[in-house]
Structure formats: C-alpha cells, structure tokens
Amino acid sequence: MSLSTFSTCEISDALIKLGSPHGGYIPDIHIQSPSNTDTRICGPAYTVQMVRTSDQTAPKLSDHFVDTATPQSVIVINAPPRVPNVDDDPGTKNAVWGGLMTAGAQAREAVGVVISGRCRDLAEHRAAGFPVFARSHSTLGQSPFVRPSAINVPLVIEPQDNAEGPDSFPAVTVEPGDWIVADEDGVVCVPKDMVDKVVEVAGIGRDVDARVLEDIKAGKGVQASFKLHRGNPKNAKM
C-alpha cells in the first residue's frame, strides 16, 4: 500500500500513534474546488511563503512561483497570518490564488494547491477541475496586499484564530518535500522521513477498524467492539 490509498483521517490517526502532537492536521482548510467531494490529492509539498506588501525587508522572487512549481507536487501557500495582540490587524482578507494561477499550475502538472489563506475565481477552478483547498475565498487579488517572498522554504502554519496557552493547537511545519494529503475531511502533512512508518501503522489501523465495524454491525455494541479490538495492547500501541 502507498500513502495515497489512505484517508486523511487514517493518516492523522497513524501520526498520533507515532507521537505527533497534531496528527499532521492543518486545521480550517477545506476543499473549494472541484465541486465533487470525492476529490483527493497526494504529493510532495512545493512551498510558497507570502508576506505583506508593506514588508520591504523580505526577499523578492525573480520568477513567478507558479512557473517554478515541480510536476506532481502539491503547491502549499502560507499567507500572512493575523498579527496576535494587534487590535487593528484584520489579517489578510485578499486571495493569494486565482484562475490564471490554476491554468499555470495545470501546465506545470501540479496536482493541486493547499492555501493557508484565501482563493478567488472559484468558477474557473471548478471548470478546470483543479483541486483547491483553502481557508476561504475572496473577491480581492494579491495586489496591493501581499506578495510571494520565498519558495521551497519551511512553512509554519498556525491554526486560524488560535487561542494562546498550553492547550492551544500546535502549529504545523511543512518542509519542502513533505507529503501532503487532502480530501473532503481536511489536509494533513506527513514528514517525508515518516512516510513508510505512517503507511505501516495506518494499514494496521485500517485492519483493526474493519474488525470493529464488522462486530458493531453484528450488534455487539460499540464499547465491547472497541475493547475487544482497539483495547488489545498491540493494536493500541499501533
């Protein structure tokens, strides 16, 4: 089996069992295109960091980031987050991805885009059948609000409106080449050096859940079925 055969839920379960504090889950990002909910993507991350246009110290790209996207990659874009504890900072309400970028990404044979931010031109993405996962959408484009600053750099993606404190949901760091899987349930990031172990643990979890489901359908009850199969120390560990 390969990573692409597992759902994002199965992958998150495996990562939690392997000690990840967030299960690879990048919260608050949902499928925007295409309209059918059975779309799923899986591929290595090609990362893009956006900054506010007012940031004159951040690097500037010489080429458009879509033109340098690698074939079969998932383009992952991190828009500038809301600045904590700044009352007049609304965060970026503009989109960082539009219809022309989808055309360029398809020409580069990218498999989809995941945006910690907003997209626009929904009808164009859907007509093209291109997978777009984003926090939301907008009528505004990048200019004059944000600009791309770096590609193939680590992205630290913070949850939207995350509360501060010891119980806050941890940020997810996406390294270039990490594997991104996205479907109707959400988006997960699998560190590239953990792929084989995640596939192994997810496969065990799928087999266990199949036995649990069979017993529940047979009327043995949820609690008893969980205890019998998931309560096994070997299965609990895996």
Image (tube, rainbow, N blue to C red):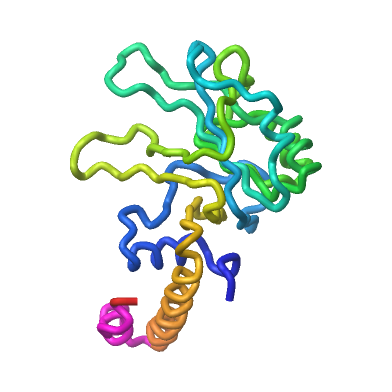
* Whether residue 108 is situated above or below residue 51 in the rendered picture: below
* Whether residue 166 is situated above or below residue 228 in the rendered picture: above
**Is 228 covered by the magenta stretch?**
yes
Question: Dividing the picture into quarters, in which one does residue 171 lie?
Answer: top left
Q: Is residue 178 visible in this depiction of the protein?
A: yes
* Whether residue 200 is situated above or below residue 163 in the rendered picture: below
Residue in the image at 54% along x and 14% along y: 53
Q: Is residue 134 visible in this depiction of the protein?
A: no
**Is 232 covered by the magenta stretch?**
yes
110 vs 14, left or right, is right
User: Residue 48: where, in percent of width, then height?
Assistant: 57, 35
Residue in the image at 45% along x and 68% along y: 198
Of residues 165 and 48, the one drawn nearer to the viewer in this rendering: 48
Q: Main secondary structure of the magenta part?
A: helix
Q: Residue furthest right?
A: 107
220 vs 198, left or right, is left
Residue in the image at 56% along x and 67% along y: 3
Of residues 156 and 238, the one drawn nearer to the viewer in this rendering: 156
Residue in the image at 49% along x and 47% along y: 175
* Whether residue 175 is situated above or below residue 205 in the rendered picture: above
Of residues 121 and 48, the one drawn nearer to the viewer in this rendering: 48
| Residue bounds of the magenta highlight | 219-236
45 vs 216, left or right, is right
